Image (cartoon, rainbow, N blue to C red):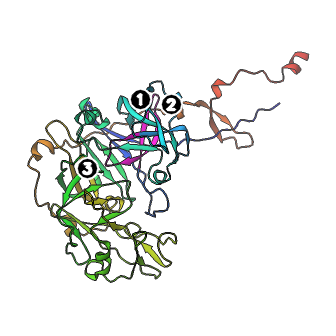
């Protein structure tokens, strides 16, 4: 009798770089982003997050304008993504015996608490989160994969903000600085927590204070922009000195009036366009060998930040979104309610973003710079200097630069299920040996025992 052993490698081994200075730490994690924005599939950024004890890797969707924290249960119905959380595998998971506060009829679950960590060195125990058990909301299926990592502590609730995982990590002395750095561009997407890596950006970091939001606003991570500029370098009408937000779940850029923009060659350039007033989608004719250029720049504190056009502001041809021979463009009309402008992924993929989260005595700030590397930026653009510097910079923005680079050592719950010994695969080559899932739990067996006894 022969035993055929099979295995399935159902997890991904992730490489993390963890950097520390004495007891305070910063971590550098890969961010997963699509090469192009298409509007047809999930376009959002995901970050490897560790939940539970031992840790399970959840590739959480990064959300810049909320504090919501959720993971998809391993038995979730209609949840989108490729990683999920098995609460039965965590020894530190605690049910809080009530529904997740943000549950809806088609997107719901229970609230738990457990250990949350990043890269093996940063971790906080007893962080509340939603364990999503029903993910049937078709809108959210295109926006959220695997779960939700809300990066923005509630500015209107001091108690809730102090319980946010970023605040907890800083208050416990784990973080080198109360700051997060992010690159959403497909060339080198990453997130750093606790420090800003000088290798990730070029030019000056343009620090802008976040404004105090109104409780009735949908988004609360608001800041003031100088305006939006078109092809000719002049501000679009009604775009100056407005409130803007950053939205990593949005694939568009809102502006005062898309009609005015595309119809005016001074703003849009020499392009042929199509406007669908029913859907609100604007598109450019792009059935030639030369792709049209979408010219749009955000000016913030005196610095111009051009947004990349190809596969970003300009999307691939899609027959169900735009007319035949046309490519949809990202700009959409702004809503009538505050905040005025929503800067989604096309803007985020064109800049380097720093977020100095609020702590005692210091408000929140966004910092803008240009991504390092071979980006489509001129020396003149990179050398721009901000118009002003925040008055409390010496107190709040004097960040400690990182120095050392320790190596993390941890195993995920999935890795622990595999055997330490490797076994040959039936029918495979002699060198094709692999670890097996749960082999240590197999009962001992004496093969051909009846034949042995007869002798």
Front-most of residues 171 and 2: 171
Residue ranking furthest to the left: 391
What residue is disc 2 on? 87
Q: Is residue 148 left or right of residue 207?
A: right
In the figure, residue 328 lies in which quadrant?
bottom left
- CB within 8 Å, label 2 to label 1: yes
What element does badge 2 sit on? helix
Compare marks 1 and 3 and give the one earlier in the sequence.
Answer: 1
Residue holding disc 1: 114
Instruction: Residue at 14% x, 43% y: name it.
Output: 396
Front tag of 3 and 2: 3
Disc on the earlier residue, 2 or 1 = 2
**184 and 254: which one is in front?**
254
Crowding near pointer 2: few (<14 within 10 Å), some, many (20+)? many
Image quadrant for the C terminus? top right
Residue, x 18% and y 57% (percent of image)? 224
Question: x%, y% of residue 7?
Answer: 66, 38
Residue 221 marker: 3
Q: Between marks 1 and 3, how big is the CA–CA gap?
A: 27 Å
Q: Magenta span covers which residues?
A: 46-69
């Amino acid at each position: 009798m022969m035993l055929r052993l099979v295995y399935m490698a159902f997890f991904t081994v992730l490489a993390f770089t963890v950097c520390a200075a004495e007891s305070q730490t910063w971590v550098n994690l890969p961010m997963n982003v699509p090469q192009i924005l298409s509007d047809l599939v999930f376009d959002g950024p995901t970050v490897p997050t560790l939940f539970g004890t031992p840790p399970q890797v959840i590739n959480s969707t990064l959300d810049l304008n909320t504090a919501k924290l959720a993971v998809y249960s391993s038995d979730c119905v209609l949840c989108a993504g490729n990683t999920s959380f098995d609460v039965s595998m965590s020894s530190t998971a605690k049910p809080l015996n009530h529904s997740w506060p943000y549950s809806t009829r088609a997107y719901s679950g229970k609230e738990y608490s457990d250990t949350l960590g990043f890269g093996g060195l940063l971790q906080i125990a007893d962080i509340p989160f939603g364990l999503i058990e029903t993910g049937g909301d078709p809108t959210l299926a295109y926006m959220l994969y695997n779960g939700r990592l809300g990066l923005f502590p509630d500015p209107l609730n001091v108690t809730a903000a102090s319980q946010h995982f970023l605040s907890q990590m800083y208050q416990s002395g784990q973080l080198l600085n109360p700051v997060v750095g992010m690159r959403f561009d497909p060339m080198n997407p990453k997130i750093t927590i606790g420090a800003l890596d000088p290798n990730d950006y070029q030019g000056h970091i343009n620090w802008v204070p976040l404004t105090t939001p109104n409780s009735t606003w949908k988004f609360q991570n608001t800041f003031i922009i100088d305006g939006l500029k078109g092809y000719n370098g002049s501000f679009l009408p009604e775009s100056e000195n407005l409130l803007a937000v950053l939205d990593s779940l949005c694939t568009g850029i809102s502006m005062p009036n898309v009609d005015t923009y595309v119809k005016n060659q001074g703003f849009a350039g020499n392009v042929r366009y199509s406007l669908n007033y029913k859907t609100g989608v604007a598109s450019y004719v792009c059935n030639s060998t030369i792709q049209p250029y979408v010219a749009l720049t955000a000016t913030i504190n005196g610095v111009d930040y051009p947004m990349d056009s190809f596969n970003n502001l300009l999307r691939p041809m899609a027959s169900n979104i735009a007319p035949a021979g046309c490519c949809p463009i990202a700009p959409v009309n702004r809503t009538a309610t505050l905040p005025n402008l929503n800067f989604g992924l096309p803007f985020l993929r064109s800049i380097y973003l720093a977020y100095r989260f609020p702590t005692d005595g210091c408000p929140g700030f966004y910092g803008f710079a240009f991504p390092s590397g071979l980006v489509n930026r001129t020396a003149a653009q990179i050398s721009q200097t901000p118009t002003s510097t925040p008055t409390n910079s010496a107190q709040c923005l004097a960040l400690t630069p990182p120095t050392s680079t320790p190596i993390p050592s941890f195993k995920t719950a999935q890795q622990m299920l595999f055997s330490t010994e490797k076994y040959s695969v039936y029918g495979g080559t002699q060198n094709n040996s692999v670890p097996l899932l749960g082999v240590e739990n197999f009962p001992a067996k004496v093969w051909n025992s009846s034949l042995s006894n007869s002798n």
